[in-house]
Image (cartoon, rainbow, N blue to C red):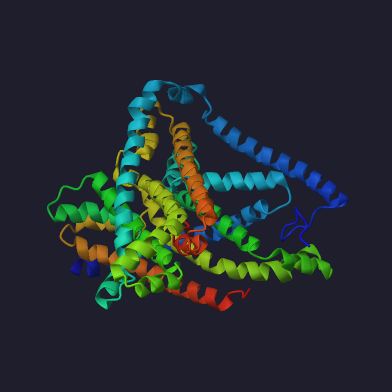
Amino acid sequence: MEAVVDELPVILGAFWLTVRLTVVSGVISLIWGIVLAAMRVSPLPVLRGAGALYVNVLRNTPLTLIIVFCGLGLGTVMNVQFSQDDLSLNSFWLSIIGLSAYTSAFVCEVVRSGINTVPLGQAEAARAIGLTFLQTLRLVVLPQAVRTVIAPLGSLLNALIKNTTVAAAIGVMEAALRMKNLFDSHGDAIIPIFLGFAAGFIVLTLPLNLLSGRLARRLAVVR
Amino acid sequence: MTTRGATVLYDVPGPRARMRNNALTLVFGVVLLLVAYLVWAKFDEKGQWDGKLWEPFLRGDTWTELILPGLRNTLAAAVVAAVLALLFGAVFGIARLSDHRWVRVPAAVVVEAFRAIPLLMLIFFAQYGGSLAGLVVTEFAAVVFGLTLYNGSVLAEIVRAGILAVPRGQAEAGYAIGLRKNQVMRMILLPQAVTAMMPAIVSQLVVLLKDTALGFVVAYADLLNAGARVVPANYANLIPSVIVIAAIYIAINLALGYLATWLERRSRRSRKVAADPAAAEMAGGEVALAR
């Protein structure tokens, strides 16, 4: 227990990094995922094909492989740099590229299935009363799609929080790697340290679960 | 009336829309080709398409000596962990439905806790905690331990949802003809639930297979280790090697994915199944989504 109390600033710092990884890559993958979803539901076969290719490749590749590709492939071999002198900043952004590229494929599928759950009759009725494409989208399709998408997006965000630990593969000092380092320096306090980090993740994910569950129930579309 | 070809967002294109779509197809086709060319050119700049870097993959010994042993280790970890996780999932999934509070509550706590803890932390804990207890924990054991607990907890939720998706009348009919609790579970609920759960279980096994790649972090000699450490150490071709390895993972996962779709279609067709596969999958799918 003492070890956890002594190292509390270090532990909180590690979780702060986890939170930053989650927020930044969450925002990027939300935007990129919506773009991909728009491609996949578009009437143009070229865009549909490109979107489907991206999603199927990224979804079926292990996240660890993607992050290693970003860290070693893009970072070391291709020499992609975000900062000349700060190596940790470099691996931070490289792992964000990997996390966002991976998560956006799942966001795309969630958004796409959200749009597809809106019954066709809704859009036909909208067109029949003379709404334009944008009006149909804004007033009829999206309000229903957004509601069905809330709960799955919540569990995606939850998975993203846990997935940020994979950035440890390229040496980002987030919670999991920091925990391993503390194991090394406090060999006698492995169980308290583990419980401390586990509690940290539960604190991060539990409120999110409750919130997205409650939102989903309140916003559910009655059909 | 539903017109064929119309989607929620787009009506069937008329002559003008078809013209516009053709023009846009051309524009976006060119843009995508341009993007592909730029990516190709960037990698070309660093000589990544050099035949020298790709040539090792045409030789048999690269495969038999370096890549296939990694693939074998990945599959070994995945199979052992899958069997253990299915057992764990079945036991805890059923335990969560128990009539006894002292069984139900601890099972729920275990399942919820292991679902909330990242897999990598479980793997690290297995390594360090095991040596604390005086055990020699191999990388294989640590990876299997983590995969079993994490995926087992997710499978427990799938099992629970699958059993709950069997219509209540089935169990009631079982009790009415005098079956005992375990007979109802064994002879009535489980056989019907398993069929309904099949697609969700297979999807979770794809997740499990993908997660074996985390063994890379603790230097388990798996497929990713072969592709990102062993092969590049011999031929200095990290990017080609990782691309080849990714293709292997994608091929295996796509094959399992098709299996899941096929199973789902089959269980939808079969009239014997009372439980709705979609309901079981919803519960599983929600947790299985990203991992």
Query: Up-down: is B72 above or below B202?
Result: above
Q: Residue B167's x, y, as percent?
A: 46, 70
Q: Quadrant of the N terminus of chain B?
A: bottom right
Q: Quadrant of the C terminus of chain B?
A: bottom left
Q: Return the residue found at the far front.
A: B177
Residue drawn at x 35%, y 69% is A202
Query: Residue A198 is drawn in which quadrant?
Result: bottom left
Residue drawn at x 38%, y 27% is B63
Instruction: Say if residue B149 shows up in the picture.
Output: yes
Of residues A39 and A173, the one nearer the viewer is A39
Query: From the viewer's perspective, is A35 left or right of A168?
Result: right
Query: From the viewer's perspective, is B202 left or right of B219?
Result: right
Residue drawn at x 87%, y 51% is B16
Q: Return the residue found at the far right.
A: B15
Query: Up-down: is A117 above or below A93?
Result: below
Of residues B182 and A26, the one nearer the viewer is B182
Q: Return the residue found at the far left.
A: B134
Query: Up-down: is B154 above or below B179?
Result: above
Q: Residue A80's x, y, as percent?
A: 50, 42
Q: Residue A19's x, y, as percent?
A: 43, 64
Query: How many numbered marks have been drawn onto this rendered protein structure?
Result: 0
Instruction: Say if residue A181 shows up in the picture.
Output: no
Query: Residue A69 is drawn in which quadrant?
Result: top left
